């Protein structure tokens, strides 16, 4: 059974950096994305990297600060720089199943989430 496991969240001061990692098992070669969900808000798209091709795209709110990358067919990372308090959320990686890469309903596989907290 395919599974995604995230790691790397934590507490950081504003302006700091974190690197999240997502490892897939049971199946490889997904287009992968990161979403995030802050308390009281809907889950929102953050970044995506396609498979194959490695084409990336980002939400406007993180463009220039976050970088999504793929170490191999099974592992995706999200490097987050210049973090802001508004980046505080649970971050989820997801495997794409079809449709718009910006819509959470297009993703068929989800990790359990990792908490990122940015203090001011």
Image: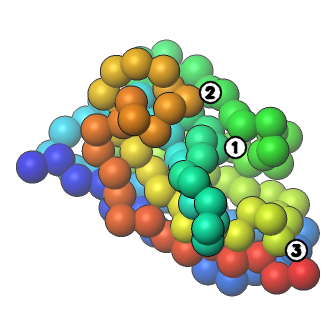
State the residue at coordinates (59%, 42%): 45
Residue 26: % across, % down: 15, 46
Relative to 58, 104 lies left or right: left
- For the residues marked 3 and 1, what is the alpha-carbon distance in whole angstroms? 17 Å
Q: Alpha-carbon neighbours of circle 2 within 10 Å: few (<14), some, or many (≥20)?
A: some
Task: Please name whichever residue, 46 or 10, is drawn nearer the observer in this view of the structure.
Answer: 46
Helix, strand or loop at disc 1? strand
Helix, strand or loop at disc 2? strand
Relative to 47, 54 lies left or right: left
Residue 29, compared with residue 44, is above or below; it is above
Which residue is the site of mark 2? 56
Relative to 78, 81 lies left or right: right
Q: Alpha-carbon neighbours of circle 1 within 10 Å: few (<14), some, or many (≥20)?
A: some
Query: Which image quadrant is residue 61 in?
Result: top right
State the residue at coordinates (34%, 21%): 98
Residue 78: % across, % down: 60, 51
- First in sequence: mark 1 or mark 2? 2
Task: Please name whichever residue, 43 or 117, is drawn nearer the observer in this view of the structure.
Answer: 43
Which residue is the site of mark 3? 14
Residue 20 numbered mark, or none: none
Residue 114: % across, % down: 49, 70
Contact, mark 3 vs mark 1 (Cβ under 8 Å): no
- First in sequence: mark 2 or mark 3? 3
Can you say which quadrant of the picture contains the C terminus? bottom right
Task: Please name whichever residue, 118 or 69, is drawn nearer the observer in this view of the structure.
Answer: 118
Contact, mark 2 vs mark 3 (Cβ under 8 Å): no
Q: Is residue 40 visible?
A: yes
Residue 28, compared with residue 120, is above or below; it is above
Residue 69: % across, % down: 57, 40
State the residue at coordinates (78%, 46%): 62
Which residue is the site of mark 1? 67
Contact, mark 1 vs mark 2 (Cβ under 8 Å): yes
């Amino acid at each position: 059974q395919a599974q995604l496991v995230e790691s790397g969240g934590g507490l950081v001061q504003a302006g700091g950096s974190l690197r999240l990692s997502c490892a897939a098992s049971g199946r490889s070669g997904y287009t992968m994305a990161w979403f995030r969900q802050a308390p009281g808000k809907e889950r929102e798209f953050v970044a995506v990297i396609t498979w194959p091709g490695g084409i990336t795209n980002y939400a406007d709110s993180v463009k220039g600060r976050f970088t999504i990358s793929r170490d191999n067919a099974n592992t995706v990372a999200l490097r987050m720089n210049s973090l802001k308090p508004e980046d505080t959320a649970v971050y989820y990686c997801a495997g794409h199943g079809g449709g718009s890469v910006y819509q959470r309903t297009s993703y068929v596989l989800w990790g359990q989430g990792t908490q990122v907290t940015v203090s001011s």
